[in-house]
Amino acid sequence: MKRLLLTLLAACSTLAETAGGDSNLPTAGAGPFRKLAAAEVRGAAPYVLDVAASQFRQPAALALAGDGELALYVVMKDAQSRDIIARSHALDARTFYGATQDLGHHAQAVLSADQAWEGSDLSHPSVLATPSGVSLYYTANGAVGLARSSDGLTFTKSATPVLAPDALGPIGSASIAMLPDGTFLMMFAQGGSIYEATSADGSTWLRKGTEPVLAPAAPKTTLAVGELPPFDTLSVSDPCLAPRMTPGGRLQIRVLYTGLAIDAGAVPEIGFAARYDDGPLARAPGDVFTLPKNISSPALFEWSEGSFLYVDADSSDGSHRAIVGAISPPTITLDPPGDFPGAP
Amino acid sequence: MKARLTLSARLAVALLLSAPLARANPLDTFGFGSRGTAMGDAQVADAHDFSASYYNPAGLALGRRFEIAIGYFRATHELETNGKSNAVDPVAGLVGGILLPGKILGIPVAFGLGLHIPDDRLSRVRDLPQTQPRWELYDNRNQRVYLAANLAVQPVPWLALGGGLSFMAATHGTLDIEGDANIIDVKQSQVRHEVDADLTAIRYPQFGARVALGPRAALGIAYRGQFALNLQLSARLRGAISLGPVPTPPITTAYYSLVSSSIDAFLPQQVVIGGSFLPADRLRMNIDFTWIDWSAYKTPVADLDVSLDIPPPVNGWPAGITPPTVPAKTVTIPLVMTDRIVPHIGVEWRALDRANCHGFLRAGYSFQKSPIAAQTGITNYLDRDRHTMAIGAGLTIDKPLSFLPGEVRFDVHAQVSVLPTTVTTKTDPADLVGDYTAGGYIWNLGTSMVVGF
C-alpha cells in the first residue's frame, strides 16, 4: 500500500509537457528554410547527395507515391566528363540512392546529349508528372529540350528543342509546371532576368512577350527602418516553378530563384516571388535561404509536414559541387533519416 | 457569530491590503464554476456563491452561509489551420473559492475568494515574431493562475455592492554573459553566464452592484479592470575576442546589449450589465451584455533595443573575418482590434423539487464576434467568431449529514465553443504564410461542489 502511494505521488510530481500551439502552422511552403542538421541526414549535413566525381548539380524534384518519397533528377559528370542528367530516389526526402554512404549504388543516368542541336552537355532538368507519364525538360546549347517517359527512367527525346534561343540570347535554365486547367507554364532565365512562356500541350510553346516577369531588383541607397536590402540586384536565374491552389481557392504561381547582388563579394541567395493568377510577380523581402557555399538552382519538394529545398553548393572542402538539403518551416525537427532505397 | 466576523475581517484586510491576490483571463473564456458556465456566463445579476468573486463581487453579499467550493474543469482546444491541428494546449485545473458572510453593525457583509490553479503551469510567457501564426486569444493568455479577493456589502435589502483587488505577475529578467571568444576556433571560447529573473506583482480593481427589483427580478453591473503583463528581458554580453585559445591576448573586446520589452498578456477592461428574472416559480432566465475594450489591446510584439560595439583591432580585422552588424530593427505592425459587446443568455429550470433535495437543468449561449481585424498583411493573429453553447445540471441537498446543517450542491457542465472555419487571404502573393483556413472547436467539461455550513 505504501509503495502504491509513493508511486502515485511520484506520478503526480511531473513537469508540464512542452508548450504547444506551434504545430502545423500555415505556410506558403516556400520558406524560410534551414539547412538540414547532422542528425537529420546520413553523412555530412547538410549535404544529401555528395559524390566528388559526379559533381551533382541543378536538382529537380518529382514527387512519387509515398509521403516524402521523391525522385531527384540532377546534372552529373559522366566518365567522359560530360554533363548528363541522372536520377536518384529517396523515401524520406533525405536519404538518396547513390549517395556516398550508399555503397555499391550510383545515381542512374537517364539522359545525355545525343542530338545535333544539343552540343555535348545537358543542364537544368525540370521534371513533372503528366497524365501520360513523366516529362523531363532540360537545357542544352541555350535551348530547351523535352524528353518523355512512362517510368521516369527511360526517356524518349523530342528531335528539336521546344524553345529556342532568340534575340534576347541563350536560355540559361527553365522550369516547367502544369497548371490546374491542364495547360503548361514555363519560366526561363535569359540574360540575368526571368521570362515566361505558355503551352497547351507541353510541346509547343509560345513566349509571353519580351519583358521579364522578374528582373534584378533596383539597388537601394537608403533603407527604411526594418527594410532589408535587396540581394538580387545583379541577376535572377534558375527559376523553380511551383504553382498551387491556395486554401483560399486562388491559383498562386510560386517561383524560387537564385539571386545575386551587384556588390563586390556578394554570394548567391535563394529568393521567392509569387503572383495570384495572371498578376505581376511580387518578391518576398529578403532571401528564403542562404549559405556561404555559392548556392544556386533551387528545387522544391513538398510533403505532408512541410517543404524541402534542394540547391547545389560547394562541397565542404570546396573541391566540387554537391546537393544541399534544407527544410521549411525551420522549426520542424525531422526524425532520424531512413534507409537507402533499393532502386533509383 | 462573533468569531466568524473576526475571522472574516482579518482575512479581508490581510488579503486586500497585502494583496496575494490575482485575477486573469481563463475565466473570461471558460467561465467560473459549473453553474455559471452552464448558464452561458450570464451571471452578473445572479451569482451569489463563490463564483461571484468573478462574475460580480456584489453577489457575495447575498450569501447567508459560510461556503467552501472546489471543482475542476478541462478545456480542450481543437483549433486548426488548413485542416490540421495546431495542438493548442488545453487549459485545465482546479477551481474553488470561499464565501464568508457576516454582519457589521447589522449590515450584511461578505468576503469572497476565488481561485483557479492550472494543472500544468502557473504562468506562461511567449515572445513570438509578429509574422508567426498563433491563436492569439487561446494559445497563451489563458495559461494563468487566477486569484481574487472581494468584499461585499448589502446596505439596504434591494442593493448590494462589492469590489476587490486582483493580482498578476510581471516578468523581468537579465542575462549576463562574459568571457573570451575565440573567433578562429569557437569551441575554444570560454564564457560564463548569469541569469536573474524576477516576478513582480500587479494589482487590478474590480467592482460591481446588484439591484433587486423585487423577489423575481434583479439587475447587475460589474466592472473588471484591464491589465497588461509586461515581459522585460535584457541581455548583456561582454567578450574579449582573440585569435587563439586562452590566454592568447585579445585583439578587441565586444560589447552587446539587448533589451526586449513586450506585452505577454493583456486583459482589456470590461463592463457587464445584465438581469436575472423568474418568469415562473421553477424557471430562471438571465441575460448579460459584456462590453470588452478590445481596441485598447496591446500588440504582443517585442520592442527590441539592441546595441553592439566592437572596436576594430589595432591592426584591422584578420582576412576572412567580418564583424557582425546590428540586425535591422523590426517595424511592429499594430494589432488592430475592435470593441465588442458580447451577449450571454442562460436559463435554469428547477426540475426536481423535494423537501430537502432540488435538481436543476441549465443551458446557456454566448456569442463573441472576433475582435481581431482580418489578417491580410504580414501579421497572423489567428481568431474566429465564437459561438459558445453549454448545458449543465445541479443537485442541492439540504442538511445531508447530521454534522452538516447547511447544504451541499453538486454541479456539472459541458460547454462547446464553435469557431466556424473561414479563409484568411493575403494581399501580398509572396507572403510566406499565404492564404489559410482557420477554425475549430473548444470543449470544456467540468464539475464543482459547494458545501455550505
Image (cartoon, coloured by chain):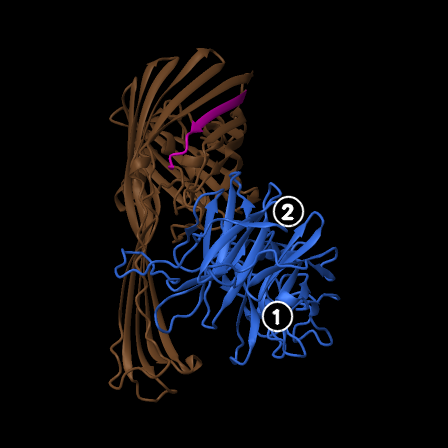
Chain colours: A blue, B brown
Quarter assignment of residue B137: top left
Observer-side mark, 1 or 2, equals 1
Q: Nearer the viewer, residue B168 or A203?
A: A203
Q: Earlier in the sequence, mark 1 or mark 2?
A: 1
Quarter assignment of residue A90: bottom right
How far across and how far down the image is residue A145, in percent? 62, 60
How far across and how far down the image is residue B243, in percent? 36, 85
Residue B335 horizontal side relative to residue B424, left or right = left
The answer to whether any part of residue A307 appears in the image is no
Q: Main secondary structure of the magenta part?
A: strand
Give amino acid for label 2. Answer: Asp
Magenta stretch: residue B368 in it?
A: yes
Q: Secondary structure at mark 2?
A: loop
At label 1, counting other C-alpha atoms closer than 10 Å, the crowd grade (few under 14, some 14-19, many 20 or more) is: few
Residue A27 horizontal side relative to residue B56, left or right = right
At label 2, counting other C-alpha atoms closer than 10 Å, the crowd grade (few under 14, some 14-19, many 20 or more) is: few
Q: Nearer the viewer, residue A199 or B360?
A: A199
What segment carries the magenta color?
B358-373
Q: Which residue is label 1 attached to?
A: A119
Q: Which residue is label 2 attached to?
A: A201
